[in-house]
Each structure stands twice: as C-alpha cells, then as structure tokens.
Image: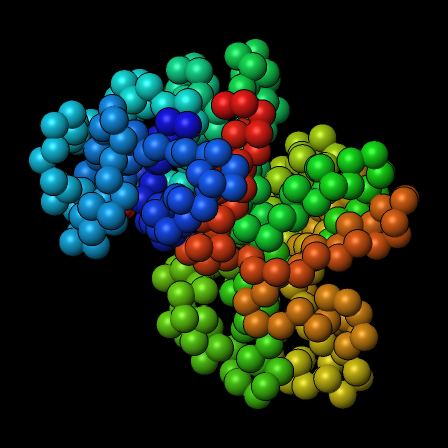
Amino acid sequence: MRIVLIGFGTVGQGFTEILRDKGDALRRQYGFTPQLVGVATRSRGTLMAEDGLDLNALLEAIQKGHLDTYPNNPGVTRNLSTLELLEQCGAQVMLEAGTTDLQTAQPALDHCYTALAKGMHIVSANKGPIALAYPELMARASKVGKQVLFEATVMAGTPSLRLAMQALAGATISEARGIFNGTTNYILTQMEGGMSYAHALAQAQALGYAEADPTADVDGWDAASKVLILATAIFGKQLKLSEMTVRGISSITSEDVEAARAAGERWKLIARVTPQGGTVEPLRIPVTHPLASVGGATNAVTYVTDMLGEVTLVGAGAGRRQTGFALLADLLDLHRLGV
Ligand SMILES: NC(=O)c1ccc[n+]([C@@H]2O[C@H](COP(=O)([O-])OP(=O)(O)OC[C@H]3O[C@@H](n4cnc5c(N)ncnc54)[C@H](OP(=O)(O)O)[C@@H]3O)[C@@H](O)[C@H]2O)c1
C-alpha cells in the first residue's frame, strides 16, 4: 500500500515509529506491507521517493530538525509543495495529519480534495475536514469510489468511531455522551486533588497534554469538534459550532470543585450529541456515574442504544502512538477491503 503522509509532527512521527517497529508483524499477521512514498511538513521540508522512504532515516532526519538531512538516495525528490507532492507521488492513500483549523478546515480540506481527485483514499487525524465538510467530502469520495476514514479524530486510537459505526451496526444509537478532551479532564482531576486551576493547566502543558495556546481545550472547542464529528458520522447531521452550546472549564473554581465533592459529585466537561443537536458543558455528576471515574487525561464515550442499553468505552484520547495507532487501524481496514 503506497501511502503519502501530510504532517510529520507528533502524530505523523508516532505513526511512522509504529510502522518501523511493527513492520514484520504486520506483514506476517495480515500480509500488510505499507510503503511511505511521500512526507510533507509546513516548514521542515518535503520528501518523495517512488520506491519508498527509509523509515529510520526519515525519523532521524526529522529529529535533526529538517527533512533536508535525509540521505541523498537515488529517486528522492525534495521540497515539493504539499499539493505538488499529492499530485506527483502516486500514492493509494493519503494520511492527513497536519494542523487542525476549526474555522476553515484548510489547508487540510484542499489536501483531501486533491487526494480524492488523484484517486487516493483518505485517512484523517485532522478534525477540520471531518467536522466542517463531511457531506461534501463523502460526496466527492463516493463519486470516485474512495473511502474516508477518521478514527483518530475522536479519542485517538481508542476505537470510539469503529464501535459506533461497525460493532454497533444494526442497533439504533439515540445519544452519545462522553469526555472527549484529556486536557480539561486532567485539570479537573488535579483540582479535585487540591491544585489550583492555573497550576493544573501549567502542569497539563508541561506534560504535553495541552497546547501552548490551550484555548481550544479549556473553552470546550476541541470537545465540540468531536461532537460535530459524532453527529455527522452517527446521525448524519451536519451541526455548526455557532449553533451549539459550548462552555469550557475556565470559570470552574476550587470552591466549585469542593462544593461538588461535599455533595458526592464531581465536575466533568461532558459533551453530548443526539439527532437534535449537541452541547459541551461542565456538569456535576454523581461519583457513582460511569463517567465520574474517568480521571486524568483519559477519555470515555457512552452510546445509548436500543439493543444493549448503555455501552461505555474508556481509553486514551490523545498521544503520539495512541493516535498513530488509529491511522494504522484505518489502513488495516483499507487493506482488508483490498487496497
Ligand atoms: N496529538 C494528538 O494527540 C492528536 C490526537 C488526535 C488528533 N490529532 C490531530 O492530528 C493532527 C496532527 O496533530 P499533531 O499533534 O501531530 O500536530 P503537530 O505536532 O503540530 O504536527 C502537525 C504537522 O503538520 C504539518 N503541517 C501543517 N500544515 C501543513 C501543510 N500545509 N502541509 C504539510 N504539512 C503541514 C506541520 O509542519 P511543521 O513541522 O513544519 O510545523 C507538522 O509537521 C492535528 O490535526 C490534530 O488535531 C492529534
């Protein structure tokens, strides 16, 4: 399977490490032989190699700071623009692991449209195109008979979308609710242990959970983007961020946390989506509630179904390998489909 990887940051590198470390096992167990024929970054160079890039050399090059330090092997082309790379690389699958933009979905959306026009399937870790342009993306994909897979966009490699769309196929899901942002859940958990909001946020940043600009996390927009994705994937509804109630955790004080504890409750940033719409808001829930025991950077989703009642999945919501693994799982699905 010839793959082009757009974005070579945390997730792109985590994915490449998985391919390097599990290459033999993937071939043995699944007959799966992926080949990375191109990699793009915004500011650290671009590489294309018809016969595939050497994964160790690629990871070494990015650790040195720039893909220009990749060896001068025959057949290697450097410094194409991202769109030129997509036009020329001849890949069967594009992995979109570039920066999420929740206002415009760009430039990732143009990458997706170009990849589809060039006959590639799409596997996206990028939330923008899925949250904002799913109907158009799927229309273009079905016109050319290609797949768009996006497990990484909700709860990283924890198979939240697979559970809803594959394992629960045939059941009717009436609601999904959960904890979809590790940064805010980590902060709330630390505050329960007596830490101030500011200190807990600084710690989340130091641990790499929060972005340098944590607004999208603490104000609820990251969780809201996952609500958009679940709404469209499960209910076929294209919600808009501007039409949703979205409240974050920045106004929750140590006193609020203490008051909840005294009442046998716990604050959680709960995202909820039904066929009617979605919300993200901090709620006090009883400590006996299934989502109350989800602590630290962990995420969880509960699907309310007609067949099984409530089904809850708890697991990693972010991380280098955890998200890289979601890309692998989607690629294995494409492999099973014969790509
Ligand atoms: N990190 C997680 O745990 C996680 C979990 C789920 C989903 N995601 C999503 O996965 C995606 C990647 O996340 P990340 O944490 O890996 O981000 P990151 O470390 O900031 O890496 C982003 C990469 O995209 C590249 N990029 C940006 N614009 C580009 C363009 N126009 N053409 C080519 N490359 C471009 C950047 O280039 P430079 O290196 O030059 O900056 C960088 O290599 C994001 O959309 C994120 O929302 C992340």
Name the residue: 57% across, 88% down.
194
Q: Is residue 188 depicted above or below 227 in this figure?
A: below
Percent position of residue 143, x then y: 57, 11
> Outermost residue toward the front?
28
Left or right of 43? Residue 313 is right
Percent position of residue 218, x then y: 53, 62
**Residue 17 visible from this viewpoint:** yes
Quick one: quadrant of the N terminus? Answer: top left
Left or right of 197? Residue 20 is left
Given residues 155 and 183, the one toward you in this image is: 155
Given residues 198 and 27, the one toward you in this image is: 27
Q: Is residue 78 depicted above or below 192 in this figure?
A: above
**Residue 82 visible from this viewpoint:** no
The number of callouts visible is: 0
Name the residue: 73% across, 84% down.
261
> Outermost residue toward the top?
143
Percent position of residue 239, x then y: 66, 36
Name the residue: 44% across, 63% down.
210
> How are the residues colored?
rainbow
Left or right of 333? Residue 259 is right
Q: Is residue 101 depicted above or below 219 in this figure?
A: above
Query: For residue 74, which quarter of the picture?
Result: top left
Percent position of residue 296, x then y: 57, 72
Query: For residue 180, which quarter of the picture?
Result: bottom right
